[in-house]
Amino acid sequence: MKPFIFIAAVALLAAAPARSQALVDPSKVAPEYREAAERRRAEQLRQRECAMKADLAKVLPRDRTTYLNHCLETMAAKQ
């Protein structure tokens, strides 16, 4: 039983932590793709803002997707 526990502990420690998607930096993209990178960065910033609002509102995980979709739709309607 001890070898199993040891192997399981090593496997958990060796696993890389999951990282969130980094913000796109348009200045580090080839010129022909810069416009798309700028649009992607703007979308990422809107998503982060809505996620922050959901955190501050303490939205339950089961309701989070609905809240985020509504928030993104509201932001799109304002523009």
Image (cartoon, helix red, strand yellow):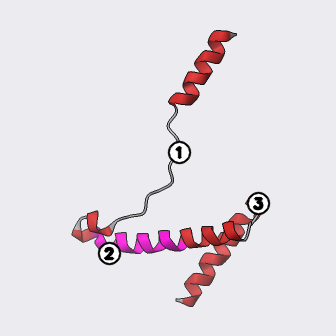
For label 3, the crowd category at 10 Å Cα-Cα, with few meaning under 14, some 14 to 19 and many 20 or more, is: few
Real-space Cα distance between discs 2 and 3?
35 Å
Rendering coords of residue 67 (x, y %): 70, 71
Q: Which residues are magenta?
A: 33-46
In percent of the image, x 70 and y 10: which residue is there?
1
Q: Is residue 66 left or right of residue 23?
A: right
Indicate whether 32 appears above or below 12.
below
Rendering coords of residue 28 (x, y %): 27, 63
Q: Secondary structure at mark 2?
A: helix
Check whether the beta carbons of the residues at disc 1 and disc 2 lie within 8 A of each other.
no
Rendering coords of residue 40 (x, y %): 42, 70
Real-space Cα distance between discs 1 and 3?
21 Å
Of label 1 and label 2, which has the lower sequence position? 1
Q: Amino acid at mark 3?
A: Arg
24 within the magenta span: no
In percent of the image, x 56 and y 72: which residue is there?
49
Residue at the outermost bottom position:
78
Mark number for residue 2? Answer: none
Q: Amino acid at mark 2?
A: Glu
In percent of the image, x 57 and y 89: which residue is there?
78
For label 1, the crowd category at 10 Å Cα-Cα, with few meaning under 14, some 14 to 19 and many 20 or more, is: few
Q: Secondary structure at mark 1?
A: loop
Rendering coords of residue 66 (x, y %): 71, 69
Q: Is residue 41 left or right of residue 6?
A: left
Which residue position holds label 1?
18
Mark number for residue 35? Answer: 2
Indicate whether 28 appears above or below 18.
below
36 within the magenta span: yes
Which residue position holds label 3?
62
In percent of the image, x 29 and y 71: which residue is there?
34
Check whether the beta carbons of the residues at disc 1 and disc 3 lie within 8 A of each other.
no
